[in-house]
């Protein structure tokens, strides 16, 4: 179901015209109310959306550096304290948490975007959905409000209750579950009965993986359900992107509210959003009030799809390849741990799909061969020729020299939240 057909099927050129007007207003608002951007943009001419690449990028660290005891949120805060209705924290994968304030209007826009993104995955009013996020202080809480907005019955569960969760699936018979791909994989692996449960749709978010074909196929078999993914970033919005039944990348559910760009991560140079293009995703708020961000570097490395989608939604689509922060450079070649997992997973059913990369030195740059532990499937034994076949496949697909160590089934750690693909 398309939540807002007038918006979601609007020709993309028209969308850019609407967004241009919003962007000009947002920029004027920033120059009037944001201490951070007044300083950062000093002397720059106001521009329209077509020239946004002339403006500087915003890095999370820059914002964090402006936090003071008097203003723990940061100098990008534009709204009065009395206008804020919520303050979330980001989970801080790269350091200490930072705060995400929202006005009532911001929160409403987040929920609308989230409802559109998740509705793309085929869930609808009258259905039941079990969620497994311990949302607590984190922005995921706003995503969960999207399910109620769609008219669904939301059954919050959290993690750490695996047995009770499986029992609840059997008793309450939900049509859908929402969880991280890591937890979805772990549950399916240990509970064969899920393959014949009431669950028709498994919605995954929170980390890359749900869009990797081999990993997705394994999840779909384990759950006997269709798997689609969603993605957001705390500082900009929750579930900004959501995948439709075509399973060919996530649509921009938060269109009207967020503008997306692509850059080359090493140089910051803007790239065209062309079909097949890859780069770091950069997002700009278009209608935000509390603490809008301009050209915010998400550190998510994505591949873009712009071909028409059968579902009728007209936004470009993205598939997350990995976090720029997780990227390793092996003799000049960029290597994403999730891409290594994707290649290795093609060797299923002989492999379990779990891998662990063990860099030999600190930092991003690594000398080959890159050590990769590959877990075997139950009942499979290690064999030098098999390790060599995986090594050769990684070399031909990712152009990286690795050392593949086959490890027995069950020896790599499973996660209830996000999988760790690199261990130093
Ligand atoms: Zn679609």
Image: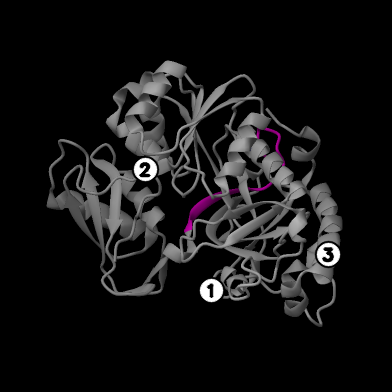
Q: Nearer the viewer, mark 1 or mark 3?
A: 3
Q: Quadrant location of the N terminus?
A: top right
Percent position of residue 333, x then y: 41, 69
Is the magenta region chiefly helix, strand or loop? Answer: loop
Any part of residue 243 in sight: no
Does 224 sit above or below residue 294? above
* Cα distance in 3D space between marks 3 and 2: 41 Å
Q: Residues within 10 Å of mark 2 (few under 14, many from 20)?
A: many
Q: What number is the disc on residue 266? A: 1
> Is residue 319 inside the magenta stretch?
yes
Instruction: Identify which residue, 339 or 407, lies in the foreground.
Output: 407
**Region of the chain picked out in magenta, as a range:** 308-322
Helix, strand or loop at label 3? It is: helix
- For the residues marked 1 and 3, what is the alpha-carbon distance in whole angstroms? 30 Å
Left or right: where 107 falls relative to 165: right
Corner quadrant of residue 373? bottom left
Colour pattern of the rendering: one colour
Location of the C terminus by quadrant is: bottom left
11 is within the stretch colored magenta: no
Sequence-wise, the earlier of marks 1 and 2 is: 1
Q: Secondary structure at mark 1?
A: loop
Q: Quadrant of residue 299?
A: bottom right
Can residue 423 be seen here? The reply is yes
| Quarter holding residue 309 | top right
Q: On screen, 117 above or below 340?
A: above
Q: Is residue 344 above or below residue 327?
A: above
Residue 63 against residue 91 in the figure, above or below: below
Q: Residue at x 41, y 60 (%)?
A: 336
User: Which residue bears the numbered disc 2?
Assistant: 416
Q: Is residue 96 left or right of residue 290?
A: left
Q: Which residue is mark 3?
A: 29
């Amino acid at each position: 179901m398309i939540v807002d057909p007038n918006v979601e099927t609007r020709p993309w050129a028209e969308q850019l015209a609407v967004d241009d007007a919003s962007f000009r207003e947002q920029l004027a608002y920033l120059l009037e109310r944001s201490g951070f951007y007044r300083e950062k943009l000093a002397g720059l001419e106001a521009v329209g959306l077509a020239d946004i690449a002339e403006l500087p990028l915003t890095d999370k660290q820059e914002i964090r550096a402006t936090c003071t005891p008097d203003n723990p949120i940061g100098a990008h805060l534009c709204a009065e304290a009395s206008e804020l209705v919520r303050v979330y924290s980001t989970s801080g994968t790269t350091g200490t948490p930072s705060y995400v304030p929202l006005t009532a209007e911001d929160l409403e826009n987040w929920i609308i975007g989230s409802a559109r993104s998740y509705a793309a995955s085929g869930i609808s009013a009258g259905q039941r959905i079990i969620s497994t996020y311990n949302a607590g202080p984190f922005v995921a809480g706003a995503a969960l409000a999207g399910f109620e907005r769609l008219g669904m019955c939301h059954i919050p569960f959290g993690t750490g209750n695996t047995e009770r969760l499986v029992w609840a699936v059997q008793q309450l018979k939900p049509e859908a579950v929402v969880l991280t791909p890591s937890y979805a994989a772990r549950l399916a692996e240990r509970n064969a009965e899920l393959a014949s449960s009431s669950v028709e749709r498994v919605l995954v978010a929170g980390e890359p993986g749900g869009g990797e074909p081999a990993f997705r196929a394994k999840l779909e078999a384990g759950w006997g359900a269709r798997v689609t993914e969603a993605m957001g970033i705390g500082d900009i919005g929750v579930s900004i992107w959501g995948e439709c039944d075509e399973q060919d990348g996530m649509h921009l559910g938060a269109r009207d509210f967020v503008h997306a760009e692509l850059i080359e991560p090493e140089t910051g140079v803007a790239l065209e959003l062309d079909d097949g293009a890859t780069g770091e995703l950069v997002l700009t708020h278009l209608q935000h009030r509390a603490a809008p961000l301009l050209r915010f570097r998400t550190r998510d490395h994505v591949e873009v799809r712009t071909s028409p989608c059968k579902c009728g939604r007209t936004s470009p689509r993205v598939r997350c390849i990995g976090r720029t922060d997780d990227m390793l450079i092996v003799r000049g070649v960029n290597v994403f741990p999730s891409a290594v997992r994707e290649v290795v997973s093609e060797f299923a059913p002989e492999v379990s799909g779990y891998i662990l990369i063990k860099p030999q030195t600190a930092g991003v740059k690594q000398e080959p061969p890159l050590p990769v532990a590959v877990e075997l499937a139950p009942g499979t034994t290690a064999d030098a020729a098999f390790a060599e076949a995986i090594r050769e496949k990684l070399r031909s697909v990712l152009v990286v020299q690795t050392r593949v160590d086959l490890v027995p089934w069950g020896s790599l750690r499973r996660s209830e939240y996000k999988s760790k693909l690199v261990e130093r």
